[in-house]
Structures are given as C-alpha cells and as structure tokens.
Image (cartoon, rainbow, N blue to C red):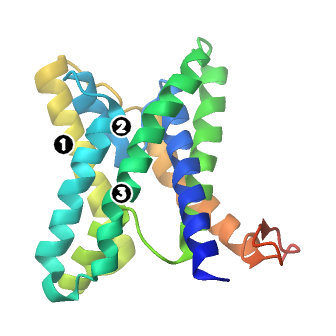
Amino acid sequence: MSIATRYLLFLMAVIVQASGIALVVKSTLGTSPISSLPYVISLASPFTLGQMTFTINMVFVLGQYLLLRKDFAAIQLLQVPVTLVFAWFIDFFMAIWAWVVPTDYLWQLLPLLIGTTLIAFGVAVQGIANVLMLPGEGIVYAVSRYFQLEFGKVKTGNDVILVILAAVISLVYLDGIEGIREGTLISALITGTIARFFLRHLSRVDADGKLVFRPHL
C-alpha cells in the first residue's frame, strides 16, 4: 500500500468517524465518551461541537509534545490540519443529520448504533492506514508511553476522565446532566468490539487502492 493510499484512507476514516459522532449526538441518548466534553462545553457556550472538538484536541496535541518532547515525531504535527478537517466535518454532519429527530426510544437506538458503527469503522481504517493518530488517541499513546502503562487501560482512564469533566461542567453550567446517558456507556462498550471486527475483515487493499472485505475467518 503506497503512502498516498494510506493518507487517503486515513482522511476517509476521519470523515466517516465525524459522521458517526454527529449521528450519535442526534440519537439524544448521549455522546461517545471522547466527544462528551466538547459537546457539553458547546451546549454551555456559543461555540459549536466542531469548534470545541478542535480546541480540546489542540490541548491533546500540546500534551503529547510536553510528554514526549524529542520523541514527538514532527510528522505528528499533521494532527493539527487533520483535526481541523475532522472538526469541520463534525459540524457539517451535525447539519446533514439535522432531520434525525427520534421521538421513540427504539428510533433513538437506531442512530446510536449506526453512529457507533461508523465511529468504529473510522477507528479501524485509521489503524489499517497506520500513518497518524487523531489527538484523542495520540494523547493516550503519549501517556501510556511516558508512564509505561498499558494503552487499553490509559484509553479507558482517559474516557472516564473526559466523561467526569463533562458531567461536572454540565452540572455547573447547565443545571443538570446533558449529553451523558446510556448511549455514552453503550458506545464505550461496543466501539472496540466493532472496530476489531472491521480490522479482521477490512485488511486487504485491492489493485485500485480500495479496501475490500476479506473472507470470513
């Protein structure tokens, strides 16, 4: 797989993940853990979800640099423009999915599950591309490397911290819990499993540089 194909796949994955995040929000059952903090701040401020996603992710990039210093590869600075694209597409898909206004609980679950699947697909394809990480994953990698901790445990801890911060800000500024519901827990529990499914099947690129499904293992 050429480097150009890898970056194209990565960009595609970022856009798909952005669409999934917006769709999960539209389910009104909560946001994904990584989006909980920017979403709550966007509700308590004049800024959009995309704008707050970009701002918080820039803090993550700074955190990576402060932790890794000389081991922070210059190529990872591409996280900045990629995050700008990511944030723009989150707001774009928030507008695209504006018609999704589920009133029945069953219909709330549908966009939640579809959105979570899109997020997982994006995560899996980013892993296949293997060129960059979004800052949310990058800060987890930096912390796990600096403190020599298991990546999965740091990821879980990071998600928990973000959700707690979102809950506190929501209670203080919104007089209640917003954006954190059972959908947040569902998304946290199943995203990894779905991503692993895609990684088992979406791991071959054809002659045209397109991802294709492998036969069932």
In the current view of this chain or complex, which residue is farthest to the front? 4
Report the residue marked by disc 2: 50
Residue name at image x 29 percent, y 46 percent:
54
Mark 2–mark 3 distance (CA, rounded to whole Å): 13 Å
Tag 2: amino acid: Gly
Q: Residues within 10 Å of mark 1 (few under 14, many from 20)?
A: some
> Please, what is the three-letter code of the amino acid marked with disc 1?
Leu
Q: Quadrant of the N terminus?
A: bottom right
Write the residue at 49% across / 32% down. 92
Nearer-N-terminus badge (1/3): 3
* Residue 33 appears in the figure: no
In the rendered image, the vertical position of residue 94 relative to residue 190, given as above or below? above
Residue positioned 72% across, 76% down in the render: 203
Q: Which mark is residue 165?
A: 1
Label 1 and label 2: CA atoms lie apart by 18 Å
Q: Nearer the viewer, mark 1 or mark 2?
A: 2
The nearer-to-camera label among 2 and 3 is 3
Horizontal and vertical percent position of residue 207: 83, 78
Disc 2 packing (10 Å; few <14; some 14–19; many ≥20)? many
Image quadrant holding the C terminus, namely bottom right
Q: Position of residue 144 (x, y in %)?
A: 27, 79
Identity, as a three-letter code, of the amino acid under mark 3? Pro
Q: Position of residue 62 (x, y in %)?
A: 16, 64
Q: Is residue 86 left or right of residue 13?
A: left
- Residue 81, which numbered label? 3
Q: Residues within 10 Å of mark 3 (few under 14, many from 20)?
A: few
46 left or right of 6 in image:
left
Which mark is nearer the camera, 1 or 3?
Answer: 3
Badge 3 marks a residue whose secondary structure is helix
Q: Is residue 138 above or below residue 56?
A: below
- Where disc 1 sits, the SS reads helix
Q: Is residue 206 left or right of residue 58?
A: right
